[in-house]
Amino acid sequence: MKVIVEQGKCCSAGTCVLIAPEVFDQRDDDGIVILLDERPPEELHPIVHEAVSVCPGAAISTSEDT
């Protein structure tokens, strides 16, 4: 899995960080999402998918490695 973040869509809600702090963080100055792990281990895939589904700005997506 590859995680893709579009910072321009981020509304700084922070739900991704609450759900998957191993994969996401926020900038201190404005709360915009920071991607910590573009290719998280398989055991984190379910929580990454959850973060994608609850992101209010639709700023996070995933793609399968080919």
Image: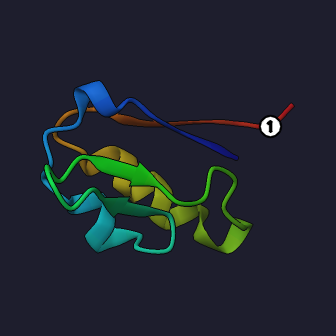
Q: What's the residue at 16%, 40% (across, down)?
A: 56
Crowding near the residue tagged with mark 1, few <14, some 14–19, many ≥20 C-alpha atoms within 10 Å: few
Outermost residue, right side: 66
**Quick one: 27 or 55, which is closer to the camera?**
27
Left of 38 or right of it: where is 24? left
The quarter of the rendered structure image containing the C terminus is top right
Q: Quadrant of residue 45?
A: bottom right
Left of 47 or right of it: where is 64? right
Q: What's the residue at 25%, 50% (across, down)?
A: 54
The number of discs equals: 1
Which x, y percent locates residue 40?
66, 62
Which x, y percent locates residue 12?
15, 48
Which residue corresponds to mark 1?
65
Left of 6 or right of it: where is 54? left
Picture colour scheme:
rainbow
Give the answer, above or below, for where 15 lies relative to 20. Answer: above
Give the answer, above or below, for where 41 lies relative to 3. Answer: below
Q: Report the amino acid beneath label 1.
A: Asp
Which x, y percent locates residue 23?
50, 64
